[in-house]
Amino acid sequence: MSDVLHRVRMTVNARAATIAVEARRTLAEALREDLGLTGTHLGCEHGVCGACTVLMDGAPVRACLVLAVQAEGAAIRTVEGLAAPDGTLHPLQQAFADHHALQCGYCTPGFLMLAMAMLEENPAMEEAEMVERLSSNLCRCTGYAGILAAVRSVMRR
Amino acid sequence: MSVIGRSVPRLEDPPLLRGEGAFAADISFPRQLHMRVVRAEMAHARLLAVDVSAALALPGVVAVWTGEDVATIPPIPFRATKLKGLEPYCQPILARGRVRYVGEPVAVVFAENAALAEDAADLVVADLEELPALLDAAAPPRDFDATHATEPAILRKSYGDVEAGFAAAHAVLDLDLSIGRHSGVPLETRGAIARYDAASDTLELHGTAKKQHWNRDEIARLLGRSPTSVHLFEGHVGGGFGVRGELYPEDLLVCLAALRLRRPVKWIEDRREHLVATNHSRQQRHRLRAAVDAEGRLIAIDNVFFHDQGAYVRTHGARVADMSAGLLLGPYAVPAYRATGHFRLTNKTPAATYRAPGRYEGTFVRERLMDAIAARLGLDRVEVRRRNFVPVSAMPFTRPLDALGTDVVLDSGDYALLLDKALARFGWEARQADIARRRAAGESVGLGLGFFVEKSGLGPSDGVRMSVDPTGVVELVTGAASVGQGVETALAQIAADALGVDYRCVRVVRGQTNRIEFGSGAHASRVTVMSGSATHLAGLALRDLALGTAATLLQAPKESLTIVDGMVCRADGPALPIGEVARALAAGTKLSRERAVPGLTTEGWFHSDHMTYPYGVHLAQVALDRMTGAVAVEHYLVAYDVGRAVNPKLVEGQIIGGFAQGLGGALFEEFRYDERGQPLSTTLADYLMPTIAEMPPLDVLVTEDAPSPLNPLGVKGAGEGGTNAVGAAIASAIDDALGNKGLVTRLPVTPREVLRLLGEIEA
């Protein structure tokens, strides 16, 4: 409990953002409540489900476990930054649709950001490593088959 | 080519992929307050006092309520399986006098923001005097309160002469089987946002799901308003699985607060709350006796079970116990049957339905029995099932039983055919030979199976309103709801097929009580059957109206016209967009006056007295790690006959996702408690849901051999067959790996349990 607000400057989806937050504010809350980016979902708020996964300086992080003040100076990317400005889906997003990788869609933003990091880190990733990486997030609807198929489809053969 | 039966892309996906979803937590209103629930921290205690003074003193706190403040609000009612005598066990929206489970709402705090509300909730002090916790439903009942015991009801269902069956038996099997406590645990927790709109004197509730119309009526009744002055809205829904969309205390509390405080009130459940506050399910113990003849044919079954309802009876009444009694027999013909269900309360989170309720449990029990019969009589496990199937010649097959308030009439099915197809697809015989070789080499490996009959399409009625606007867009308003399973796409396909338009031109409006007067919601695998059939009928009627109107406009006989891709076509060429036909029927036009109602619009209703019964079989191959007790599922097949698949890819998605949940219940998931009733599974690191790493190689075989004769599309529900028999098949396979001794009697089969069983064999 504190009324002291901290100024945080970061870039979010390549745009500069400045917010004033309590020290206890998580990055997920800051994105959702202060910046209106509600595509980042909270599933557990204790770092297990991965629904809130965003990219922080290129690396996937649980936005529920990062304090907003820790994001000072960081480049944050969220699901809202994936599609083109005209709404055209990113190939990864399109692959999720093509492979029925989502049902309710609640875990989807987290999986998309997790997969984006995989794709950028190693676009020729072996399947075993894909499974290992994707096991860091939970989905309760799909049984993961479509998610794996979607990610596999955008990896370089 | 019909769009029914094609795996067309989902209409739901684009906004969800862009992060534009409107889930409960994404909904906010100006001036809103945030509600935080203070929950009981003891499983059973006298509630002596609640001190809210410190919380109220915190700046930014607007109100704090305890049970006294809501004493005029009746407890949460039930809508299903209303057995006599359940009323005293309904849950008050805030505890009074006693708390009965850890997580029970004791007080609520309303504050200017969510963090403040949580701070204030920490300052509320409940004075509790601990009482002994009752945690075993099979233990003798105790006092619920001064006048009621913890066994509100005993369910009894029977037919035939059970005692004579046992007297004539060649062999009698006696099993003691238990299913653990688990639940749906959707990735989105619950949420509820209420708002009073003074301009229209309407109470709105957002973040709703599943049963909007019933919930609207009950909220109105409990708060003393007319149902037409209460509206429920459904946005995106992050998974349902049975638990979401029931009427919970929090739903009423936000509504009451919006009315009393005259500000919008938002409540978002956190995960710890979810795991102790949202419905649990499954936990049941069966003491099963069965009489068989020398050929392994069932003569009689005596099914005595103990249903662990938890601390209160919620909206489902005794539904899960009812289904556990009425649907246990699955695909088998049994001359005599008796079920005695002890419906009992314990000091745990209240329970209700979770995907394949009563059937996941019943299939585990029944299929354990079939394996036991095979072992006792030295018969092949597959053959024992085959001998007991209800034959295709006996369809439709009436069982002298009821479930969900309707007689059990198996509408169609060729169980032996599906079993044959599944065994061939799985390579059962080749795998058996391979398993024998590996066993000889010292491995603990096994095969298992579970056959099951699902139920779907619960009636009695569903209606839709279907209209075409002047741009040619079709609006389909349904009283059904979505929990993320693809309802919009499936209904759009059915509408498009009947009317003759592109399915992408169909806007499906669901879960909005201000748009349609009646609705039965989305549960019990009912939407495709009930709302789908209503949509089909509405689409045909609308097509007829469009053709009749176009006949005048195009000056051609109605019979000579067709509708293709949204164009009404004359055989010799001229065509009219369907939107033009709608325009010709707009209010005030000449043509519209010839009708009772203007507009290219119609309603379609479908009624059904009986459920449809899809069926399937699960086959599993497992290997046990003797060092760690881990169970590796090496291969798995779900074969499921759905009558007719509207969208095969969505059906497959339902099966694979349902399988993952069944797997969780078979091997990993369980709500555990300590001896004082403290819940031990209060994070997702303790309640273990499968990740992708736990998913085995999974094959899905969807067949359409037995369309339902009960609806015009021939469809049966696809939502629960992936879950139904996972516990049964995995248990069967593990037991096979342990030598088919009937050692696996309890779900989930955790590594610790496997090690215990391995030790038992060696000892």
Image (tube, coloured by chain):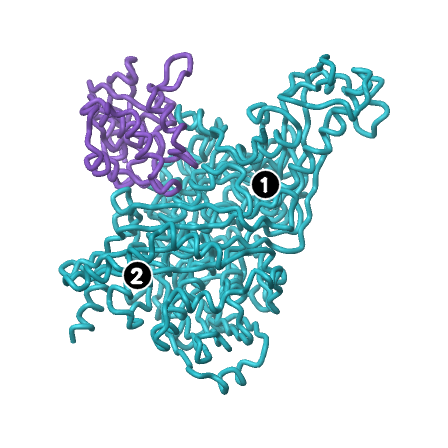
Give coordinates of residue B427: x percent, y percent. Answer: 33, 53
Q: Is residue B750 left or right of residue B309?
A: left
Residue type at mark 2: give it.
Ala
Q: Which residue is mark 2?
A: B733
Q: Is residue B77 visible?
A: no
Residue holding disc 1: B480
Q: Secondary structure at mark 2?
A: helix
Q: Position of residue B540 (x, y in %)?
A: 70, 33
Question: Which residue is drawn at the image coordinates 33% and 56% (left, top)?
Answer: B428
Quadrant of the frame with the N terminus of chain B: top right
Neighbour class for label 1 at 10 Å: few (<14), some, many (≥20)?
Answer: many
Query: How far apart are the two marked residues, 1 and 2, measured between alpha carbons?
Result: 39 Å
User: B188 above or below B747?
Assistant: above
Q: Nearer the viewer, residue B365 or B522?
A: B365
**Which residue is at the front of the view, B59 or A40?**
A40
Identity of the residue furthest to the bottom in this view: B167
Query: Residue at horizontal 30%, vertical 67%?
Result: B744
Q: Quadrant of the C terminus of chain B?
A: bottom left
Q: Residue at the location (45% across, 64% down)?
A: B362
Q: Which tint was used for chain A?
A: purple
Colour of chain B in the image: cyan
